[in-house]
Amino acid sequence: MIYMMDKILLVVAAYLIGSIPFGYLIVRGKGRGDIRETGSGGTGATNVSRRAGKAAGVLTLLLDAAKGCIAVLIARTVSGDDWVIAAAAIAALVGHIFPVWLGFRGGKGVATGVGIFLVLAPIALLCAGVIFVAIVLLTRFVSFGSITAAVLIPVLVWLQYDSKSLLTAAIVGAALIVFAHRGNIQRLVSGTESRI
């Protein structure tokens, strides 16, 4: 039996895992300064690739996704409680977007969300991923593809899975990602958003 304090610790651990600022560390390690001074100011893969090259961006993407996977897998293994797993998923995403180590200014949450839903809802993630790729290829806006895919995840989860905890995680996760993209949304509307 897992006690309340253990559940709280799992969620806190998920937040701290999500808070690891891989993009920031990779760019710093390459001697390219503070990633938050580039482009959108985020620490995610797209911004890292602008500052430190495609290889650094891909590495950031993989590591940010991995921390989402790990946070959820730890919660699943230790607790087995669907609501604790959902809370850990949300906490990991919050950690990425609002990392304690960087003054609560992190990335947009997309790669970490991919890692989370790769574990929790792989079919929904695959469907959203196909739509993401199509949008990016057609428009060359990564942000537009990311926002659309994030919004679709709760719908796909609702259609494919019978789980209130999972649907809650998907809805909150989508809201967090859209909120993190608020600057991108403004630039998309004004026509000043950068294309790939």
Image (tube, rainbow, N blue to C red):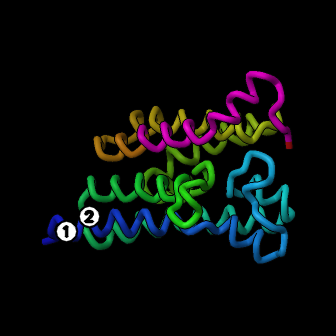
Is residue 92 shown left or right of residue 144? Answer: left
Q: Which mark is residue 8?
A: 2
In the rendered image, residue 14, in percent from the top left (x then y), is placed at: 41, 65
In the rendered image, the residue lying farthest to the front is 103
Magenta span has 147? Answer: no
In the rendered image, the residue lying farthest to the top is 189
Determine the main secondary structure of the stretch shown in magenta: helix
Q: Decide: is 107 above or below 73.
A: above
Q: Which mark is residue 5?
A: 1
Task: Tell me the kind of residue under disc 2.
Answer: Ile
Task: Tell me the kind of residue under disc 1.
Answer: Met
Q: CA distance from mark 1 to mark 2?
A: 5 Å
The quarter holding residue 135 reads: top right
- Residue stretch rendered in magenta on the structure: 171-195
Residue drawn at point x = 80 percent, y = 67 percent: 33
Quarter of the picture holding the C terminus: top right
Can residue 138 be spotted in the picture? no
Quarter of the picture holding the N terminus: bottom left
Contact (Cβ within 8 Å) of mark 1 with mark 2: yes
In the rendered image, residue 16, in percent from the top left (x then y), is placed at: 45, 68
